Image (spheres, grey):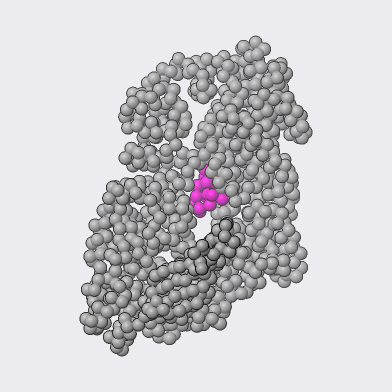
Amino acid sequence: MESAPSLYTIRLDGHLGPTALSAFPKMVAQETGPDTVLTGVVEDRSALFGLIGQIEALGLELAELRRLGPRKQSPVSGDGASPDAS
Amino acid sequence: MTSEAIRTPGAPAERPQPPNNSSATHRMLERTELQATLDRLVTKRVTIISACAGSGKTSLLRAWARSQGYRVAFVSVDRDRADGQLFWHSVLDALGAPASAGRLEKAEAGSQLDADSVIDRVLSGIVDLAEPVALIIDDLHELVSDETLGQLERLLVNLPRSAHAILSSRRDPRLRLHQLRLAGEVGEIRARHLSFTESETRELLSASGVALSDERVAALWSRTEGWAAGLRLAVISLEAHPDPDRFVEEFSGGDRAVSEYLLAEMLDRQPSDVQRMLLRTSLVPSMNGELADLLADRSDSERILLELEDTNAFVVSLDRQRTWFRYHQLLADFLRLELRRTLADEVPELHRRAAQWFADHGHVLDAVHHLLAAGDWQQAAKLLAEELFSLTLDGQQAAIASLLRSFPPGASAQDSDLALAHAASEMAQGRLEEAAAHLALAEAGLDSAPPERRRRLETTIASSRLALARRRGQFAVVTEQVERLCSSNMDESGDAAHYSALRGAALTNLGIAQMWSGQLDQAERHLSQGADLARRIDRPYLELACRAHLGFASLQSFPTARERSREAIALAERHGWDDRPLVAPALGTLAATSIWMGELEEGERWLQRAWKAVAQDLDPANAVLLRLIAGILHAARSEHQRSLEELLLAEESQALLEGEHVLAPQVSAWLASAHTHLGRPDLARTFLAGVPPARADTGEIRAARSTVSLAEGNAAFALEEAQTVLDGTSTVMHAFTLVEAHLIAGRAELELGHRSEAKAAAEAALAAAEPDRLMLPFVVTDALALLETVRPQDTAHRALLIEVREVLGGAPSARARNDWAASPEQLSPSELRVLRYLPTNLTRPEIASELYVSVNTVNTHIRNIYSKLGARGRSSAVEHARKVKLLAGARAQ
């Protein structure tokens, strides 16, 4: 994933106030139950660990980190879709 | 997360011991149980405290350190000073064993001077304390270098019984301590141990005078999960709150992320002018009252900061006098975000103010950084160009290079100040063509510069041109330029400091240029003058530049050359500059002299260290030196093909210089020798014939020719040619060429059947080799047969003769054998045990751990082994030991 941008969701415990939100300008925040979910395109691996570092620095609790896509292209299938995709 | 400013300016260079002031901690809870746990764990060799920011690690450590009866060395890793050299300096300082301690045994050689020697030093420092010591390393997560972590690992594994390490980190450290763990020597404190219990929470609240119902206390504790920073933040808010119970109700009822909520609340509680101050000062990593006043538009910041420190743990003073402060990282990051969010349009002005303050106090790099942050890049460029000379003399090239990257791309084409800065940076990285181009740009812009700045810019440009000429080997140009530069500034009444620095740089470049072009006496004189001047004006980097070359310039006497080179390296180490290209000549000199004295392994280690140092920037003059040494090393080991390859590379580097390198005759001579040894004396002869006329007449080339003649079977001719070296009609760089010539003459005489003349020549060779103990000429001229004409009892150079014969692999004389036979009784069993490890690649700490003794014990044994065997280094000790079958005996132990 080193240099290809990917879509990520990051789930944090609790709701974020405006100050904490300003630390993630490239992400969209949604309050989902007691948590906050940040969604956005992360440019590369270095940016990803930068985000994680920012979360650590603010003392926030990381509950879940998920990459939504794209997956690595397989050399056989032409469009990169997984075999199970309908 | 980006850090908003570079390094802490003005604040004390070393991180201080934990402050003694008790007033700052009267609100902190005495966590006696936790301290007792730590007490227990500390009996193990290593204790690791791993928990996230704000868990109370540092508070615990500081409280614990204060309460200890025995000595504590406290090191806080600063994000901006986290490189290996600086880290180890802090450790040594904290142990009270300054890095420049000369009493530590002279390191074996270049090898892992950076690794083992540092660890040796720290261990010696610990042992020298002669009392138990706790070494605390706080903020270990800031240490990111794998190399430094590896060194730390080895240190921990070799800690003496009297020392205990406590490491504190926000994340589990990447240290491999398996063996220690298996031995039960690693203790751990984690977040769950640090978190406040419910009763501690109650205690904290009552100590702060906050009244809460039991239910609310439980709720507060549960919501914060006992997180120390959270509780302290809550207490600050609660103290000022009219209805504490409601605060807790709102806090625990809501969904807000704990840390941010509490930080925001805490900030809200502060009076608005204090809030303003907190936000505006978050721009800099640390501040004193004056700087804070400037940023916050007030006059009593110091008082506020002191008060804040007294009442909570979020403001910390950095020095004993409590004049410099910084915020706890959690608060600082929060404040910066809040500043950008709420006072965004004030930010550039704040940066400008900070820049002004830094510039006024001489912290140029920080000033430039803030100007760039404010968007004033032209101002930044001006300031940088003005101070460039000064910064370069202080060895700040890396910092300059990184700042240059923050300028808008393409800006240097329009701005001659910036062009000048780029030129200096490129020169430091060895990109001479680009540097020349940028200098030209800078010069072109001079006319449009205001007159009061023009003089200074002119001299900076002239000085840069000088350095460039020297790097390109335009040695004659350098001399000329220096004279012009110095005379044109003679009546400069303006800036005395600037003039001295300029003169220092000029002397340095002149000395170096003279050295590489072979005028060694002049070089020595100018370099010494340069070093003295540099020391007087407190420019250690410039002093280092001179001293690093002084060794080579003193090559006439090996002991002097070695001593001066070692001095230079020690100076470099004190400042953390010993891996810079600048020290290459000193390392090279040590390598070369070692090899000439027959210590091949030591020489190789110095050489490898030199190669590491020039990795970023290999200047052709240094390249010639290092490749020649590599070539000679291979030749000494009879690896003639590889020798040839290195020497050809040396020739290539020499071709990049516009003047003749002082070592050029050597390179050619060794090249010819390599061809000869590879069975192609014809190639050697052709090659020598093609050498430029000036070089062709040197003693080195004449000696090379005579060697070829001898290989071709023409002894008479060889003898004649050797005489031309010995009759004093040619110049030689060093006595080793004379030794060679004597040996060739001797071998020729032997072939011609003139035994007594041969013996006289051998004797003369020994005499010439004695002062500097030159072994190499004997090896490369295959002098064994010649040396057999001399009997030890007949010569004044008995010891040298015996040693040479040993090295050449001949049987020692009967008398020598008797001498050695006495040895086995003299080595003690422990010494024999250590001796067994000498032929291996194990370092001293590794040997110590194999034998379950301390490194100092190993060091003592090795010292004794050397003196008993009359050896000067590891390899000769091994050789001697092998000769008398000591090793076989030792193995049987």
From the image, which quarter does the C terminus of chain B lie in? top left
The residue lying at 39 percent from left, 33 percent from top is B837
Q: Position of residue B732 (x, y in %)?
A: 67, 31
Q: Position of residue B612 (x, y in %)?
A: 55, 46
The magenta region covers B565-580
Q: Is residue B572 magenta?
A: yes
The image shows residue B791, relative to residue B839, as above or below, that is above
Quarter where residue B275 is shown: bottom left
The outermost residue toward the front is A86
In this view of the protein, can residue B334 be seen by the observer? no
The residue lying at 72 percent from left, 56 percent from top is B436
In this view of the protein, can residue B540 be seen by the observer? yes
Q: Position of residue B315 (x, y in %)?
A: 39, 73
Q: Main secondary structure of the magenta part?
A: helix
Quarter where residue B95 is shown: bottom left
The residue lying at 27 percent from left, 71 percent from top is B196
The image shows residue B860, relative to residue B45, as above or below, that is above
The residue lying at 57 percent from left, 66 percent from top is B364
How many numbered marks, from 0 up? 0
- Looking at the image, which is closer to me, B750 or B42? B42
